[in-house]
Amino acid sequence: MRRLLPVTDMTAPETAAGTTTGTTGGNLAGTTAGPPAEQGSAAGRDWSLDELADAYAYPEGDGVWLRANMVSSLDGAGQHDGRSQPLSSDTDMRIFGTLRGLADVVVVGAETVRLEGYRPARAREAFAARRAATGQGPAPVIAVVSASLNLDFSLPLFTEPLVPTLILTGAAAPAERVREARAAGAEVLVAGDGAGVEPARAKAVLAERGLRRQLTEGGPRLLGQFVAAGVLDELCLTVSPTMTAGDAQRIAGGPSVAVPTRFAVASVLEQDGFLFTRYRRI
C-alpha cells in the first residue's frame, strides 16, 4: 500500500520568499513530481492492522466524532445489485474491519441491515489491547436506525451479540414493535420526537452512553440525513476502480443541503488501483 497524501517529494519546492512554485501544493495532482516517498517501505505489501489503526485513529480528546465508511465506483455508484460488496476488495475489507475495531458504535440503517445481512460485530484479538487501553469493550455496539422497527428479531444481530444491539427510533414508533425488540434482547433508544430519528439527537443519545467514537456504514439514505443535518465529521471513502453504469444509488441520498458541505482531504492511500481516502468536515 502506498500513502499518496501527504508526500514530501510531491510538494512543490518553496521559493526564497516561502511561496511554492507550481500549483500542486502537495496534493494528489502532484504525482508528476515523481514516485511517493514511501514506496520503498510500504508499497508492494499489505499494511499491518496496527499501521492501519494508527492511520485511522480517532482524534484525541473527549469530543464526539462521527465518521462514515463508504465505497463508490468511478461513475458514482454506491452499490451494485443492491449491495456494496461487488465494489470492494480485500484491502477495503481490511480497512472496514479496522474502522470497526476502533469504533465504540456502528450506526446503520434498517434497510442496509436487511440487504447486507448484518451480523453482530465480533471481538478481534488484533484490536484487543488497543481497545482495552482506551476503556472500550471487546467489540463495537451495533445501533440500527429504524422508524418502523420492521426488523427480523430472530437474526443473530439481535440474538447473539457480544453486547446488546441498540435500536434508534422516534417517540412515535409502533409500541408493539418496540416491545418485540426489547423481548428479543435489543435496547430501544428514542432519538426523535416523531416516528423517525433526528440525526443530531442520535449522535447525542449515543454519546450520552459513552459511545463517542461513532462509525456509520450507511446506507445512502441514512448518510444523506447525517450530511443534511451537518453532524458528519469525517468520510472514509474507498474509490473503487470499477464502473457500473445503470441507476445505482450514490453513497448519500435523501434531503439536499442549501449549500454543499465542504470537506478537506486528510489522507489518501492506494492499493491495486483502489484509493482509500479520508475527508474531514471543514
Image: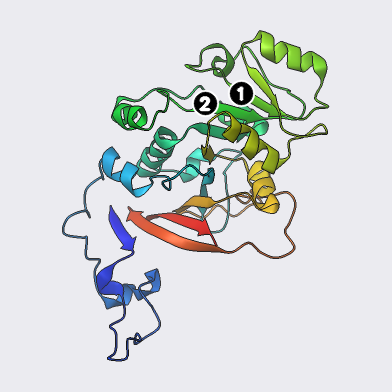
For label 1, the SS is: strand
Q: Is residue 122 left or right of residue 133?
A: right
| Residue type, mark 2 in image | Val
Q: Nearer the viewer, residue 91 or 47?
A: 47
How is the model colour-coded?
rainbow
Task: Identify which residue, 156 or 127, lies in the foreground.
Answer: 127
Residue 128 place in picture, x, y as percent: 32, 26
Q: CA distance from mark 2 to mark 1?
A: 7 Å
Q: Label 1 near label 2: C-beta < 8 Å?
A: yes
Q: Give me the residue at 26% from left, 45% from top.
A: 47
Q: Which residue is mark 1?
A: 166
Which quadrant of the figure contains the C terminus?
bottom right
Q: Residue furthest bottom?
A: 16
Up-down: is 263 above or below 198?
A: below
Task: Name the residue type under label 1.
Answer: Leu
Image quarter of residue 40:
bottom left
User: Which residue is at the front of the view, 10 or 262?
Assistant: 262
Q: Residue at x 36, y 30 (%)?
A: 131
Q: Which residue ends up furthest to the top in the rendered image?
A: 183
Q: What percent of the width, then of the height, locates residue 136? A: 42, 28
Q: Secondary structure at mark 2?
A: strand
Q: Earlier in the sequence, mark 2 or mark 1?
A: 2
Residue where numbered disc 2 is placed: 141
Q: Residues within 10 Å of mark 1 (few under 14, many from 20)?
A: many
As drawn, the residue found furthest toward the left would be 40
